[in-house]
Amino acid sequence: MNFTVAIVGRPNVGKSRLFNRLAGKRISIVHDMPGVTRDIISRDLDDGYTLLDTGGMGLLEGMSDTPGKIVNAVEGQIEFSIDAADLILFVVDGREGLMALDKQMAERLRRTDKRVMLVVNKVDTESTAIDGKEFFRYGFGEPYLVSAEHGRGITPLRKAVLALR
Ligand code: GDP
Ligand code: MG
């Protein structure tokens, strides 16, 4: 069986951008509106693992979704990933800090035996202000600070994934 890596996180943290960055091609649909990726996108990478973008599960398009629907979709995404993946990349937005939905996801992810790596995205420059301690406190070890958009921090993340494969 292929080593499977799932990207999870609440809408708009940059899961699809990260997927494209790791996959090296633009396959996942990336839009400015949260929740536009409707289905699970899966790709077998040359790096020798299968990468899943689970962001669109059950979500209807756009911002008009009720918060309850988003929570359900995110919960579905997490349960699916816990079943399907060997490694979970839990993506949060470094500029926004941890929101209620992130905390909810973190709590669920802490209760799985699956490996979880915390990826703090949107750290676009050296000077992007983030509260590293806040993220460390979530108990997933040292967070990986990346910018999926600009490619910052992607090489160390890729190496860490390959080391677990
Ligand atoms: P998803 O809903 O988690 O799949 O998020 P997307 O990948 O669709 O990205 C949501 C928004 O965040 C888009 O407007 C992206 O351009 C933006 N975004 C994603 N990654 C980064 C990043 O590293 N830096 C910045 N500044 N914006 C990003
Ligand atoms: Mg997406």
Image (tube, grey):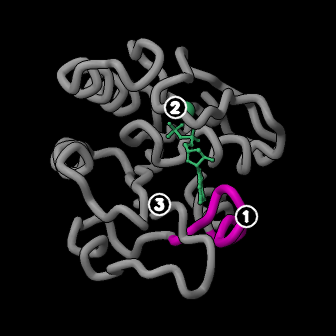
Residue labelled with disc 2: 33
Q: Is residue 105 left or right of residue 48?
A: left
Q: Is residue 24 left or right of residue 60?
A: right
The residue tagged with tag 2: helix, strand or loop?
loop
Asked whether 63 falls inside the magenta stretch, the response is no
Tell me which segment is drawn in magenta: 145-156
The residue tagged with tag 1: helix, strand or loop?
loop
Amino acid found under the numbered disc labelled 3: Val
Amino acid found under the numbered disc labelled 1: Gly
Q: Quadrant of residue 133?
A: bottom left
Residue labelled with disc 1: 151
Q: In this view, does 146 lie above or below 45?
A: below
Whole-number angstrom distance, CA of label 2 to CA of label 1: 21 Å
How many other residues sit within 10 Å of disc 2, few (<14), some (14-19) or many (≥20)?
Answer: few
Residue 98 position in % (x across, y down):
27, 60
Q: Which of 70 and 110 is in front in this view?
A: 70
Q: Is residue 3 visible?
A: no
The secondary structure that most of the magenta stretch takes on is loop
Foreground mark, 2 or 1? Answer: 2
**Picture residue at 34% right of the left edge, 45% below the top:** 114
Q: Is residue 97 left or right of residue 86?
A: left
Q: In which quarter of the image is residue 112?
A: top left
Asked whether 147 falls inside the magenta stretch, the response is yes
Q: Nearer the viewer, residue 24 or 60?
A: 60
**Label 2 or label 1, whichever comes before in sequence order:** 2
**Picture residue at 47% right of the left edge, 60% below the top:** 119
**Picture residue at 78% right of the left edge, 48% below the top:** 47
How many other residues sit within 10 Å of disc 3, few (<14), some (14-19) or many (≥20)?
Answer: many
CB within 8 Å, label 1 to label 3: no
Whole-number angstrom distance, CA of label 3 to CA of label 2: 21 Å
Q: In which quarter of the image is residue 57?
A: top left
Q: Nearer the viewer, residue 117 or 164?
A: 117
